[in-house]
Amino acid sequence: MSSAIGTSDILVSQLVTNVPEMALGQGRCGKVCKLPLQDGVEIVRWAGHFEQPVELPLYDDSERISFSFNCNLAGQADCLFEDGVHHRIEDKAGRISYSPGRRGIYRQQGALENLSVMVRPDVFLTWMGQPDSELRNLLARGGYASWHRGGELLATAQWLNRMLAEMDASHASLRHSLWFQGQAMSLIGLFLESRGSDTEPDSSKASDRRLMRARDRLLSDLSQAPALAELARVASMSEPSLTRGFRRLFGNSPHGLFQVERMNAARLRLLQGQVSVSVVAAELGYTNMSHFAEAFRRQFAILPSEVRLCTSGSSGSTRDPGRDG
């Protein structure tokens, strides 16, 4: 396989460093948010939305091991490499990859949010010590180890994804850099613990797909949660099995996951600084402001009005017409 760089190739190192947003025409946009943690370690968030299929020719010159997790996929995406290897991108699943000098075509239609912790091999080895045979082969030859799943892995990746999205929206980090470094190392540890899940039986994979359909229905409208019975019908399983499956795959019950995502949406809207607390509460189906404020406080340990005040203050105004919470 040739390692020469073509004139049309997009260098991965440039993509995650110098191209924060790509406007590729109407209905086609990709955005990169990068957070350096230490020399040789970065967190990279990709958020792409393409109404029509798009193809990006990539050349991996990053010299990084990538621990990559697909947090939200509404559509389809894959990678086709020049040696004929085809890698399908799955929702709520991750992969470990190391592809120095590898060229391929990244294809996407729809929306995808992906979070990656990228680590230089020498740094990874100082953390890992003596790697096992699978990791030694990956570092020696390059390649992919796919199908990493699990409730704790999913929850950690989604939490990091939300924090980077909020940081990008507010242009300020709400967490200390050591928090991000600790979460990144936890994510890598969870990836290493989850290896081997690619051999799970087909029946388990089918069950996970049904649970993901139920999750998509659950989160399709954050102003009103569907009944548990409806979610069970979508997943073609009993209500107790649905709840157990949610806890295993997503790390929370259906009601708990709905509330977490509901409050995360509220926080992101408030951080954008364009609407009042009362408007956000109404958008998310709350008719009682005190109930909204208490739910927000339980998740974030602050009131929604405090987030709104900070946002207003940063733009030169401290008045919030919706400070009911």
Image (spheres, rainbow, N blue to C red):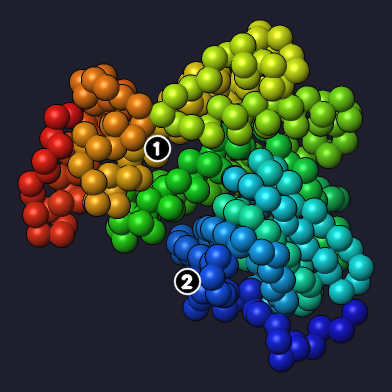
307, above or below 130, in the image: above
Q: Which mark is residue 151?
A: none
Secondary structure at badge 1 equals: helix
Place of residue 243 in the rendered image (x, y in percent of width and height, measured from the top left): 62, 15
**Residue 12 image-quadrant placement:** bottom right
> Horizontally, is 205 left or right of 116 in the view?
right
**Which amino acid, mark 2?**
Pro
Label 2 and label 1: CA atoms lie apart by 23 Å
Q: Which residue is labeled 2 in the image? A: 20
Q: Is residue 301 visible?
A: no
Do tag 2 and tag 1 residues touch (Cβ < 8 Å)? Answer: no
Q: Callout 1 environment at 10 Å: few (<14), some (14 to 19), or many (20+)?
A: some
**Residue 238 image-quadrant placement:** top right
> What residue is rendered at 65% in x and 79% in y?
11
> Horizontally, is 289 left or right of 135 in the view?
left
Q: Which residue is labeled 1 in the image? A: 264
> What residue is rendered at 43% in x and 52% in y?
165
283, above or below 318, in the image: above
Out of 194 and 322, give the one closest to the viewer.
Answer: 322
> Horizontally, is 34 left or right of 83 in the view?
left
